[in-house]
Image (spheres, rainbow, N blue to C red):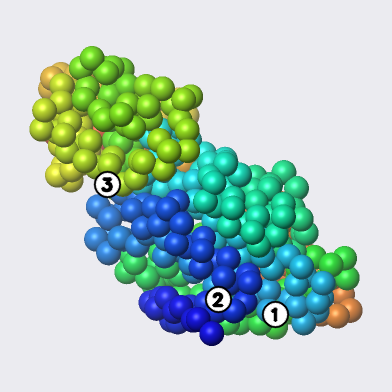
Amino acid sequence: MSLRTYHDPLHHGIVLDSEKPSEKMVMALIDSEPFQRLRRIRQLGPAYLTFHGAESSRFTHSLGVFHLARRALEKLLKFDGSLERYRGILYGAALLHDLGHGPLSHTGEEMFGIKHETWSARLIREHSGIRSILEAFSEGASDSVACLLEENYPPQKVVKSLVSSQLDCDRLDYLIRDSYSTGTNYGQLDIDRILSALTLAPDGEIAINPKGLMAVEHYLTVRNLMYRSVYNHRVNEVCTWLLEQLIKSARQLGPSRVWADEHMSTWLWKPEELNIKTFLANDDIRTIYHLQRWGEEGPSPLKELCKRFLNRDLLKAISLNSLNQIEQLEALSLARQLAERRGEDPSLSCGLRKQSLHGYQPYIGGLRLWDGVKLLAIEKASILIASLIKPGGTSWLIYPREIDKELKQKLSNLKNNF
């Protein structure tokens, strides 16, 4: 028997047994080039500039998702043994769901204009190494895993729910992992209680035993707090906006003025020509190296933008949540006027950054309680969960710190005039 153990700081020993075909497949997928690349993709993108411990990778997270999916499946098999036929597809989807992330994870999607779900599915279908491993396990497995991640059609609704739903293994892992790495305490979920409460409703779909209601209430509250305190943190929004402007500037300056290697050139100026090799060639290391080169020898304003990011000489941001859309645009106009007076390019130093805060969405894979007699939408049984349905959002005005005092004074006057 050949065992392999990954010592995880949260899940402890994640043990794989090559004598089990599905776990032998997982071991081969982990060893593949595309999956090893995830070691070089930060889970939280530029959040390390806000939370200095936020250095964990998509590799670590993906292993955690697989581990939780395996635990969840073992619980659900007690209710429906036929789920065993989907073990390989579940393992593949849980492990490979983030395979298509670009540099700096979700921030990279905004920087370069890519969608990681699309690239994950494409890599699973087209990368010869990944496809051959999945097909060796089961004919048609690569297409089944890709379709599940693309949300075209799931091979089985329970399997889909474990990978992507209001309570999936992806969210369970990233909440506790991101809380751990950022040093926040919101993400201390009762994973054991949640998994033990999983059951199957009469229609064959996942439900929650009422004994797990408080653990799920806690989970949904934690998710809300993590978005507000970590994912949509003011400094994170500034960093993402700055990186977007940086890539936009490099693209506008063009290859005649901006140095880039063969792979980055395609990412910047010929994204429609991205192939598997060129996509996989880009990661945090290559992107940050280019920022370093541009910060040393790039043309203005690209050079200054890179220095700002690399040296954490960041722009300021102030919340405009209390202002309506017209007032927010007026505030942006004021900031740009003040920045221009100080010789700043207002288009590269001032901006509005808006993010939606999605609450619990009962109409999209809503959770249900099943006690063996009655099936009930979870928000009907919990005032707390019902209160989390209402969506929210954040609006940040980004601007140079040099105009901070004057801008705040003018914004105070602006609010009084409306």
Q: Which quarter of the picture shows residue 70?
A: bottom right
Residue 223 seen anywhere in this rendered image of the structure: no
Residue for point 28% across, 55% down: 48
Q: Decide if residue 157 is on the left or right side of residue 252.
A: right
Q: Decide if residue 182 is on the left or right side of residue 15.
A: left
Give the residue at mark 2: 18
Q: Decide if residue 211 is on the left or right side of residue 190.
A: right
From what the image shows, is residue 108 above or below residue 260?
below
Going from N to C along the chain, the mark reached first, 2 or 3, is 2
Label 3 vs label 1: CA separation? 40 Å
Q: Which kind of residue does numbered mark 2 sit on?
A: Ser
Residue 313 seen anywhere in this rendered image of the structure: yes
Query: Of discs 2 and 1, which sits in the foreground?
Result: 2
Give the residue at mark 3: 285
Query: Of discs 2 and 3, which sits in the foreground?
Result: 2
Q: Which kind of residue does numbered mark 3 sit on?
A: Ile
- Rendered-image quadrant of the C terminus: top left
